[in-house]
Image (tube, helix red, strand yellow):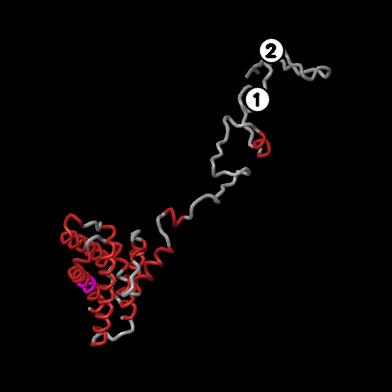
Amino acid sequence: MANKEFKVPPVAFPSAGNPGGAAPNIQQRRMPTPPFQPNSGIPFMSFDIGSATTSTSSGPIYSGPSMGGGGSANFDDEEPLLDELGIHPDQIWSKIRSVLNPFRVNHTVHKDSDLSGPILLYMAFCLFQLLAGKIQFGVILGWIVVSSIFLYFVFNMLAGRTGNLDLHTCTSVVGYCMLPVVIFSALSLFLPIDGVIRLSVAAIFVLWATKASTALVVSLADGGDEHRGLIAYASFLIYTLFSLLIIF
């Protein structure tokens, strides 16, 4: 067999005097440039913390009246959180102390009615009932609402057009005068379940709550002194109902 000859094209190498030169028939390759260079036309974002503090912002930074010169909030002129929520512990304690003496109830502190104290007494009542093994959160809350509406309608129907007792005041009075019932609920944890002693103690605390509630309603409303007996009867029914939750 005859040997075939293959023609091999000559290979040109750069000369020693010109290392960067290349043969004219070989295209010189370009090295790719990195896409995000600081010197390129594309904007480059620096993440240097030191340079970020010295850079200027696009707009002025707002400093409100509560911001001090150092940028920290100044709460010296702010009202206390409880005052903003309408909760005044001093007034609540004054109203509770006024109910402790049913014969000398200070009605002046109850002119500014609130619901913070009644809610506190409601939670205490529910807690003592829970310790007695009775889960009555919804029942007690529902009876407080119904009792307040009942006392409101009873007095305004008796007073007629001269009645100025609003529902908010009725709820506040009924709530604060529950203090004797709450105390009885705490004492019932140590009293015998059945017996004359438990009923006698319940009667004392119901009369206490009735006396305080009647005195407050008569003092806060115009013309209440004329209907003291009927107001006392309505209050007696209300707090007897709450005492039955403790006895049974």
Q: Position of residue 172 (x, y in %)?
A: 30, 62
Of 138 and 51, which appears nearest the observer? Answer: 138
The residue carrying pointer 2 sits among few (fewer than 14), some (14 to 19) or many (20 or more) residues within 10 Å by Cα, namely: few
- Residue 237: give x, y in percent of width and height: 19, 71
Badge 1 crowding class, 10 Å Cα cut-off, few under 14, some 14 to 19, many 20 or more, is: few
Which residue is found at the position 16% from the left and 62% from the top? 158
Q: Which residue is mark 1?
A: 33
Disc 2 on helix, strand or loop?
A: loop
User: As drawn, which residue projects farthest toward the top?
Assistant: 24
* Dominant secondary structure (helix, strand or loop) of the stretch shown in magenta: helix
**Residue under numbered circle 2:** 25
Query: Which one is nearer the viewer's eye here, 39 or 26?
Result: 39
- Where residue 98 sits in the image (x, y, percent)? 36, 70
Q: Is residue 40 left or right of residue 78?
A: right
Classify mark 1: helix, strand or loop: loop
Q: Amino acid at mark 2?
A: Asn
Q: Give how far across and how far down residue 77 sits, in percent.
A: 53, 49
Inspect the image, locate mark 1, and give the three-letter code of the amino acid beneath it.
Thr
In the drawing, does residue 156 fall left or right of residue 72?
A: left
What's drawn in magenta, residue-wise?
236-241
